[in-house]
Image (spheres, rainbow, N blue to C red):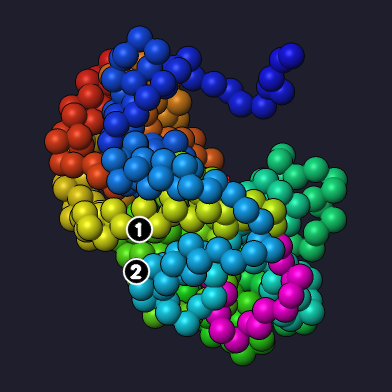
Amino acid sequence: MKLFDVYPLYDVNPCRGKDVYVYDDQEQQYLDLYGGHAVISIGHSHPHYVKSIKEQLEALAFYSNAVQNPLQQNLANAIGEQSCLHDYQLFLCNSGAEAIENALKLASFHTTKKRIIAFHNAFHGRTSAAVAATDNPKINAPLNKQQAVSFVAFNDTHALETEIAKGDVCAVIFEAIQGVGGLDEPSEEFIYEMENICRKNNICLIADEVQAGFGRTGTFFAFQKYKITPHIITMAKGMGNGFPIGGILVHPEIKAAYGMLGTTFGGNHLACRASLAVLDVLKKERLQEKAAVLEAYFRKRAAALPQIKKIKGRGLMLGLEFDFEVAALRKKLIYEHRIFTGGSSNKKLIRILPPLTVQEKHFDYFFNALELALKSNG
Ligand SMILES: Cc1ncc(COP(=O)(O)O)c(C=O)c1O
């Protein structure tokens, strides 16, 4: 049987990982500054993470959401403590898109409306409503195009107000720092205006933290740079360090009802133990605090390279913008310097999303390699 060929692949076969490195089938070492799409938060195969999952696997891997699973409450308590969002309610699922799908559905239940406002360049996933709220017509099938979605630009308060005045909007969904879109951020002023408009019109504000969440940007969630209170927060990626898990945090204003949301695998025992281990390590190793410090070092090194036109992002969710397309440069970094980086829909931008255990010496290695690669890039 052939694989359904939807992914253009780099010719690398990682077989094991340790902290910020992965090793291919020839034991060749690669520095991972991409974390497999921002997924690896506490480093590959962290010993505490491996031990926790192993112990859970030997005890019980899975039982359904028809019985008690105290690990879910433990996880809710730990997320509440580390994010300081004690009053929110946790619903667990399996991926980023599923978190978005549930957030949008909940907003629609809550408001009894159905149109979504999303932003230019947004990426929210590949499932039904999530992909409809993603600003990329190429990955939307006719089925997805049935959803009612309007896109507005960041910082265009007038456009947002005009759309909302039509009276049929259930949710405004935003990334405080765009991931796939290329690290653009709304202004602080717009963030507060957006919250205000949503509150005034009883519309759910959804913070998509699938990529930025769990400490990556130096605050637990990226939106927490501001004093806003979203109705729903979506999470996935770094939450499980590679174990598939996603979830939403729901403001106490929104009430649950039996059957409103549900999933077979969501919140299973293994996934909860994986995420609890991630939170243990984030706290013990102070990784969120370190992200802010490392950003300063990264920016200092980047500022010394004149080919870099702009440094974008926050914490360890960063982008380097050039005045040329970076696909060839990224290939050089992989095949000649053994460094993984990320691309984005902005073709001139390299995305840097390392495990949060990355150190200055790894950035030194990267910038030395980048300098060489730029010299030979023509
Ligand atoms: C901001 C954001 N939301 C949602 C998603 C979808 O997550 P998943 O790929 O786990 O479905 C992504 C994936 O890149 C993302 O970056």
The stretch of residues the image draws in magenta is 249-262
Instruction: Reply above or below: 259 against 246.
Output: below
Horizontal and vertical percent for residue 162? 69, 77
Q: Residues within 10 Å of mark 1 (few under 14, many from 20)?
A: many
Which quadrant: the C terminus? top left
Q: Are marks 2 and 1 in contact (CB under 8 Å)?
A: yes
Q: Nearer the viewer, residue 377 or 90?
A: 90
Q: Secondary structure at mark 1?
A: helix
Give yes or no for residue 256 being in the magenta stretch: yes
Q: Nearer the viewer, residue 163 or 233?
A: 233
Q: Main secondary structure of the magenta part?
A: loop
Query: In the rendered image, which quarter is residue 247 located in?
Result: bottom right
Which residue: 18% across, 29% down? 365
Asked whether the viewer can see residue 241, the reply is: no
Which residue: 41% across, 41% down? 54
Instruction: Reply above or below: 247 against 308.
Output: below
Residue receiving disc 2: 82
Which residue: 35% across, 9% down? 26
Horizontal and vertical percent for residue 201? 66, 87
Gap in angstroms between the C-alphas marked 2 and 1: 8 Å
Which quadrant: the N terminus? top right
Residue receiving disc 1: 279
